[in-house]
Amino acid sequence: MDRANVRVEGAKLRLVTAAEELFAQRGFEAVSVRDITKGADMNIASVNYHFGSREGLVATVMSRHLTPTFEERIALLERVERSGGPERVLLEGIFDGWVRPVLNQVKRSSLPEPLACQLLGRMLGEQSLAMPTGVAGLAEQAFARGLNLMAKILPEAAPEELAWRLHFLTGALSQALANEAVLQRESRGVGGKLNVDERVARLRRFAIAGLGEGKKEPAEMEPPDSQAIFNF
Amino acid sequence: MDRANVRVEGAKLRLVTAAEELFAQRGFEAVSVRDITKGADMNIASVNYHFGSREGLVATVMSRHLTPTFEERIALLERVERSGGPERVLLEGIFDGWVRPVLNQVKRSSLPEPLACQLLGRMLGEQSLAMPTGVAGLAEQAFARGLNLMAKILPEAAPEELAWRLHFLTGALSQALANEAVLQRESRGVGGKLNVDERVARLRRFAIAGLGEGKKEPAEMEPPDSQAIFNF
DNA sequence: GTCTATAAAGTGATAGAC
DNA sequence: GTCTATCACTTTATAGAC
């Protein structure tokens, strides 16, 4: 995978850094070229000179973070697949392979941790945000590996069920990274001020249970839920 | 709760409907007043006449959908709390109380189902999207009830852990509603073309397992995960 | 590679006629 | 309540001087 468009330095780096900070705070749509050049204390024309267009800068930001993240995700999932192990270990391997690369990317970022979280959370979760083609291909590869591992744990489940579980995990992860302020408000502070590692530790318990739901453990076969309010 | 700003008709309704369709497709930030009036085949000045400003229209759209949704969520969770039952039933009650009102709102909407899903998914998940104050209050009330019920099932868990689980559920729900196209692409079609009820049925299995993780069931006490790749 | 100046189009909002 | 015309800005992008 060509890394030319992932590495960035000098004037380009100043622009990218300023852009990332603003994208993290306000979202990709709500930031203008002027906001970015002002934030970087550079000339208004510099974005077009260095990146061709606003869109080129957005693509660079996406690629810069998501390329190494998805490459690491692919590598980790591959490693889990090769090393094998009992179901519980595979399940933890899927979660760690899926989530850890995102966390590592947060740590690698030069942005302050809360901003890096918001930026990654947005890139993973924001609707109608087109990924550069190279990145989309990596996302596909990672997804295929995740799906393959899921099928080892739940061989009788429909592949489409497993695909959706990985998708739910991504939604919960995006929420864990980007929406801490929302939880603070809605929970009147009960959510606490957790750093990203603590939040991911909580997500880990939640998601591993969800991903593995239904794996044969005779003791907890689905009871008939006759008293449930609704039937989905 | 005053419903004056929730019910809308005549010219206002035409504008709201056109706006909702565009917001669902492109997101709230990416739609201009001109796009909306063109979509409604109405005059450019009509948005400001009927809603005071673009922001007023956005607030109306949010309130129109989220007010009944959160009111129903509060009512259902209250009902689950009163009727009680064994843990498993409470757990299903929390999920249904949390998610069913959203699904009902999708069905109530005059928009085509896929658009209604995207709109609701965006309102639940889109970062930096300010809720009108009345709606924010309802969201808080619903959250408090959900948290209260969670504490009945997992009395020994930290409240902050339970708050985050509800937050993860919201993230996964938003993903189930709004990002079907993304899953289709990433999974190369494995995700299938599921309608919203089927997607929610899958979310139900995933999330109920995650929400209830750790509730005392001696048979499945956490095994030491010595072989896990990472320790969070 | 950085700058100014400016083009060309789009933005939300409003005054005032009908 | 609907319309036109327009204001006052902002948007991305670029030509051309330095």
Image (cartoon, coloured by chain):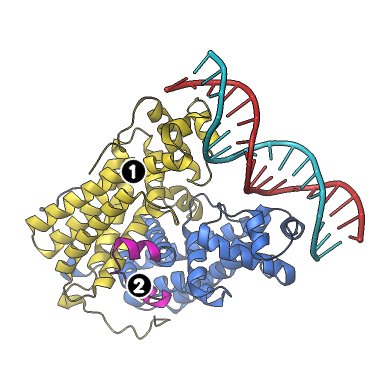
Chain colours: A yellow, B blue, C red, D cyan
Horizontal and vertical percent for residue A19? Answer: 45, 36
Say above or below: B94 vs A123.
Answer: below
Element at label 1? helix
Question: Is any atom of residue A53 visible in this view?
Answer: yes
Please check the rendered image and state whether residue B193 is part of the magenta-colored stretch, yes or no. yes
Query: What stretch of residues is rendered in magenta?
Result: B180-201
Q: Which residue is mark 1?
A: A63
Q: Amino acid at mark 1?
A: Ser
Element at label 2? helix
Horizontal and vertical percent for residue A127? Answer: 44, 57
Query: Which residue corresponds to the image point at 62% horizontal and 55% vertical from the top-left?
Result: B133
Q: Residue A214 — which label?
A: none
Which sits in the foreground, A119 or B232? A119
Horizontal and vertical percent for residue A140? Answer: 27, 57
Query: Which residue corresponds to the image point at 41% horizontal and 71% vertical from the top-left?
Result: B94
Q: Which residue is mark 2?
A: B204
Q: Amino acid at mark 2?
A: Arg
Q: Chain of mark 2?
A: B
Question: Is any atom of residue B232 visible in this view?
Answer: no
Q: Chain of mark 1?
A: A
Q: Quadrant of the C terminus of chain A?
A: bottom left
Disc 1/disc 2 C-alpha distance (Å) = 34 Å
Horizontal and vertical percent for residue A126? Answer: 43, 53
